[in-house]
Image (tube, grey):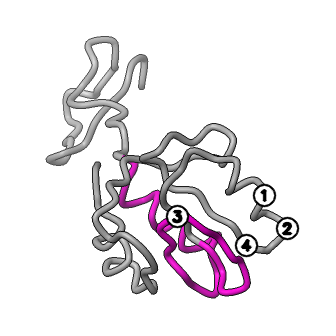
Amino acid sequence: MTRTARELAEALKLQLEGDGSVEVHGVASPERAGPHDLIYAESEKQAGRVAASAALCVVASNEVRLAGRTILRCANPRTAFARAAAILVERALIAAGIHPTAIIAATAQVGRGVAVGPHAA
């Protein structure tokens, strides 16, 4: 799901520094991130990894100094990153309905929205 840095900052109650219109599509490690992936940095030691990354938006603690990035500031970047991932990464539906190979008792009542996977008994 695409969100702007401003939308993420508001949803997660983080301080925004930089361009709030930067679009964020997903999350990644600094080494694998593209321009629209969100990354995080907890300490100044990680600033070099961020600088080498293509990511335009970073969740960072107050001690981390970064140039040329949109920054979402907070006390605990790892937790904020995980909360952002829950917003950005759509969860795949594991199953829908009752799979043809599932064995369901004739007297069983299957609730609305429940999925029964392959070979379930």
- Per the rendering, the mark at residue 48 is 1
Q: Which range of residues does the magenta coloring cover?
A: 60-89
Name the amino acid type tagged 2.
Lys
Name the amino acid type tagged 4.
Glu
* Residue holding disc 4: 42
Q: CA distance from mark 4 to mark 2?
A: 8 Å
Name the amino acid type tagged 3.
Arg
Please tell me which residue is depicted at 32% across the width and 71% down the height of the picture: 20
Q: CA distance from mark 3 to mark 1?
A: 13 Å
Residue 45: quadrant of the picture: bottom right
* Residue holding disc 2: 45
The correct choice, above or below, for 6 with respect to 73 in the image is above
* Residue holding disc 3: 69
> Of circles 2 and 1, which is in front?
1
Q: CA distance from mark 4 to mark 1?
A: 12 Å
Q: CA distance from mark 2 to mark 1?
A: 7 Å
Q: Residue furthest right?
A: 45
First-in-chain label (3 vs 4): 4
> Of circles 3 and 2, which is in front?
3
First-in-chain label (3 vs 1): 1
Identify the secondary structure beneath mark 3: loop
Please tell me which residue is depicted at 27% across the width and 28% down the height of the picture: 105
